[in-house]
Amino acid sequence: MKKTKINVGMVGLGRIGKMHVRNICQTLPLFNLKTIADPAPDIGFTQNLEDVAISDNINSVLSDNKIEAVVVCSPTPTHYDIIKKCIARKKHVFCEKPVSFLEDEIKELITIKDRENMFIQVGLNRRFDQDFLMAKKKMDSGALGDIHAIHITNHDASIPPFKFLKSSGGMLFDLCIHDFDMLSFLTGQKVKEIYVNGGVFIDKRLQDIGDVDNAIITLELENGILCSIDSSRQTHYGYDQRIELFGSKGMVLVENKKDNLYSLSDSNQTQASKINHSFVERYRDSYLNQLEHFYSSIISNTSPSVGLENILSAIQVAEAGRQSMLTKRPQGVKYE
Amino acid sequence: MKKTKINVGMVGLGRIGKMHVRNICQTLPLFNLKTIADPAPDIGFTQNLEDVAISDNINSVLSDNKIEAVVVCSPTPTHYDIIKKCIARKKHVFCEKPVSFLEDEIKELITIKDRENMFIQVGLNRRFDQDFLMAKKKMDSGALGDIHAIHITNHDASIPPFKFLKSSGGMLFDLCIHDFDMLSFLTGQKVKEIYVNGGVFIDKRLQDIGDVDNAIITLELENGILCSIDSSRQTHYGYDQRIELFGSKGMVLVENKKDNLYSLSDSNQTQASKINHSFVERYRDSYLNQLEHFYSSIISNTSPSVGLENILSAIQVAEAGRQSMLTKRPQGVKYE
Amino acid sequence: MKKTKINVGMVGLGRIGKMHVRNICQTLPLFNLKTIADPAPDIGFTQNLEDVAISDNINSVLSDNKIEAVVVCSPTPTHYDIIKKCIARKKHVFCEKPVSFLEDEIKELITIKDRENMFIQVGLNRRFDQDFLMAKKKMDSGALGDIHAIHITNHDASIPPFKFLKSSGGMLFDLCIHDFDMLSFLTGQKVKEIYVNGGVFIDKRLQDIGDVDNAIITLELENGILCSIDSSRQTHYGYDQRIELFGSKGMVLVENKKDNLYSLSDSNQTQASKINHSFVERYRDSYLNQLEHFYSSIISNTSPSVGLENILSAIQVAEAGRQSMLTKRPQGVKYE
Amino acid sequence: MKKTKINVGMVGLGRIGKMHVRNICQTLPLFNLKTIADPAPDIGFTQNLEDVAISDNINSVLSDNKIEAVVVCSPTPTHYDIIKKCIARKKHVFCEKPVSFLEDEIKELITIKDRENMFIQVGLNRRFDQDFLMAKKKMDSGALGDIHAIHITNHDASIPPFKFLKSSGGMLFDLCIHDFDMLSFLTGQKVKEIYVNGGVFIDKRLQDIGDVDNAIITLELENGILCSIDSSRQTHYGYDQRIELFGSKGMVLVENKKDNLYSLSDSNQTQASKINHSFVERYRDSYLNQLEHFYSSIISNTSPSVGLENILSAIQVAEAGRQSMLTKRPQGVKYE
């Protein structure tokens, strides 16, 4: 337990930012959170923090030489600029997905971090989920034989506010980006082709901005594996996060996590617990695991296992998906 | 239990035909099986039947005026001709799906049976499965709100012999035809558009005949509901038959049926029963229910709830799916 | 399927009797049901039977030389006399449990049937349940190591009418008798000691006749295995029939059978199907299997695998259990 | 998050002690762990602790006026003396169960803590498990009607070393004590009578010290509710912790927690994750919750919800259970 602490700064104190703060302060003594920068920090939240400086200016973080690493949770459009500044100040970065909606920005950041020899870990939290890792382990063991098909269910319980949706980059870039990455993570393959059939069922305003709230996505990987993704912004019954892997010898299935182990049976039915409501509960351990990985990477001076290259590929799939919705036909993914 | 018996004839004594014979002789005393016609009847099977005439000539069935109804289980290409002859002899017909691969043949049969005022029930057995019926009932009750998306898993445990596959009409016409019908059955909607991404993973010879053994299918219904089908000819772990209905208020999920209720836990794992291996076990009751429905329809002189019109629609979806595989893009379904 | 039919008579047409009649007429063409004898047969039921003679006098069954076997479903107190008469007429007997509440009667019947070389199978239906058989098979395979403990849950959904309860012999003789037999069936061991703690929670009139409607029963087998039974006459949520086997290497658990495979998840909960409501659904196949076994035993002239010796042991355990309730302490079981 | 920290000392650094240390240092910043006293502290463990004094003398804890509260995890026979000293120094105590095997010692401690106005919370961790709390909530809501029966399964995965078993007070005092308390916690009722049938299946040396490693326990509560406990020191397949509550309207069942959400189906079986292996995983949150409750009780100066009175009752049940094993009959529990 006695380990070198790493001083970190936090940029952005929204929903995800607060979760990371709670995790760091309560459960990750590996990090010492020195400063939080947010243009309008939630005082009700920050007043309970001990020994953490609160600032409305990102420079408080950037100019502090004792801060070795920065956790970036501000809105996506700000990431590119913030990361560049952090790297320039020789601070490692943990940045929430999808980093940027523009491939060129990500490519430039890759060049910079390689040149400066700095680490940029991206918050693709599902790669750190023990259940998906077990699925991958079983698959890698050969127990499924050759993989033929993969099915992912990715449903949010509650649609975010329209204000957020407008700047989210759209459902493919914001929500399904996890699934695009997961397919590559599980199989080690890139996506060759994508077809998206989306619809607006929940918030009609999405039609005006060319976005959808439900999508059925078909993908083909480079080695021919067939994939499908069922995705929705809102299904009320909880945060539906399932994976099915079908191979020549068998199937692996990852179920949802329930809030509670009870069931109640009466003369009408059997009633059981809801599944976890949101990423906060479902990926609680994954969020901790990925920050621990960030810590270990810095301490051992080895590249994090998930970075800009991964999010770049996922963004390229999302972009092809966006084209597919416009052209209403399958699109090859361009990696260049 | 004391009910008017209906004399039936059986045409075709393959795998499905034998199952129907067993069902009729052992569990459906409503029918009196008089004659079985098959070009090369399996004597090992027929010698155990009591009071059933066995013939290698279909005329033994057609010319018997006491036979009121015929169960047709011969290969699909023979159905059109056999049904016409049955109707001409004023015999009601229960015919296995998909009746024909040609829309025109089905349309002609519709005209004939309407003109002759006869019944033709089609073996879309899943419509009689109590679990799918319960899913439909819950959906129809409004408990799910508006339906946004439907996901169907339809995997066979073992790929049929190549000889059968060649004459099966292909995976879409033979296997997925059930799913196309199920979507309409559940929602009361027609399929507007279909996109099929298929692959050959199991029997490479399928490539030579333009067929596939795995397919991810995206469909859009006329009212906009998004659907996906995961289908495979062989996944070894059993006959995977699941349905997921997603609505604005919640979800209904139909799980697989297991062979056995036991589980065994030891220091390594928890082991449980396989799911049902084939349609024989999974749809055991559905097969009985549909023949009972056929009986009731004849006795009460009311049209069966599922007939040529339903299989026609499903065939039209399959045909658009076939086009989609050729053009590698989504295809609208043509109903005319 | 072509097999020698055995002519049977039925004595007693109550709830169980009707179920056997339905099974024989609809699903067991091995038997030809010739005659039903009941002092007041339910005409609404019998009028639908074809080719079955209905009589209010058991002699119609006994005097019919074509009847080779008799299924006895009359009230327990009549069994002893009826069985003796059947054996005297050289008719094999299938008799519902518990045959008699008096050990001496059962012993006398054993002597008679051995002398006359006739078969008497007893309706301990759970021995023919595929799920319990699988549990036994796993246990016998050594997968659990040495067995330490067994737990049985045996709950009825709805308490029978008080009139029936009064003549049922009490909860131990009527309901738990199945569990006493199951313990011996599974392990091949006799019960050495029993302690019953019972209570009246549902029908207070049971107190007046010294019976209970709930019981927690502790048993020790001759080889030291520890057993517990949770039993209730009424728990509303269904027919709770579970078994747990604990060994030095692991555990086998047999779950309940659900009516339906669906689940419905909404913002409040996940709702699933009830478990089977009664023995009719839960042991549907077991009831058929045991009559098929009766048929095979007669045809092959081999003793049925379950008979008077088994019910005698179970009755002796029940009798010790009755003593235990009176003395409020554990009682050794007397086998003599 | 900014809250007054409470300085605590820890006495005893065995398996449970280390778990509490990890919890406090990693996840419970409410407490500041100042000093650990253990006669032979594990240096491999303690060297990783930051800012924690390690001592082989309990006086380091007792004499430190800044330490407000003490967590006692030393062997049970030392608890009585340590608690008295802590109270004398005006330190609140959190003590692991069962505090003492002697009722008189516990009674004396009750007198002392009441006189000194200090808090003594007892580590009955299951009262803080969210799943059991949900079961209680459902029961208290009336959804089950009147409770008739309760069944508890309490199996350890691996039997502790014989050295520990010898000083553990025996299976009833060490393991089943949790269940005795749980029955009272759930129902608000005291146990009226207990019957224990135990056996030695795993470690034969237990016979020499009058202990058992498997037990089937029947209990009757004061209001007549019937209870059974299946308990084992070792069943290899995991830490089996289930509760079933049966009432006049329905049942609540609490299942085990699995390590992982995956399942793997192949042509032989469906394989799923093991259940949690030990209390460390199964009651991870409960251990945190109970220490948070201890913190809140001290801060708000209100008695903890679980204390010596509760463990006293449980000890009295265990003592009657011990008598029952000796006399081989049910024993009334003496509360005086």
Image: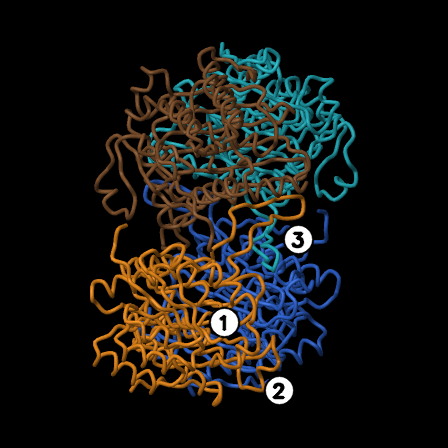
Chain colours: A cyan, B brown, C orange, D blue
Could you tell me which secondary element the residue under label 2 belongs to? loop
Q: Which mark is residue D336?
A: 2
On what subunit does the disc labeled 2 rest?
A: D
Q: Amino acid at mark 3?
A: Leu
Q: Is residue A234 left or right of residue B262?
A: right
Q: Position of residue A58 (x, y in %)?
A: 71, 25
Q: Amino acid at mark 2?
A: Glu
Q: Is residue B151 above or below residue D128?
A: above
On what subunit does the disc labeled 3 rest?
A: D
Give C114 or A330, whichever is nearer the viewer: C114
Q: Which quadrant is home to the C terminus of chain C? A: bottom left
Name the image quarter holding residue A31.
Answer: top right
Residue at 70% of width from left, 77% of height from top?
D114
Query: Which badge, 2 or 3, comes first in the chain's sequence?
Result: 3
Q: Which mark is residue D30?
A: 3
Residue at the far bottom: name it: C327
Q: Amino acid at mark 1?
A: Ser
Q: Position of residue A283 (x, y in %)?
A: 57, 39
Give A301 or C246, whichever is nearer the viewer: C246
Q: Residues within 10 Å of mark 2 (few under 14, many from 20)?
A: few
Question: What residue did someone put label 1 on?
Answer: C231
Give B68 or A28, whichever is nearer the viewer: B68
Q: Which mark is residue B275?
A: none
Work out how far the residue at label 2 is from the one at label 3, CA to CA, in angstroms: 38 Å
On what subunit does the disc labeled 1 rest?
A: C
Q: Position of residue C214 (x, y in %)?
A: 54, 75
Give B1 or A328, whichever is nearer the viewer: B1
For the residues beneath circles 1 and 2, the answer to whether they share a chain is no
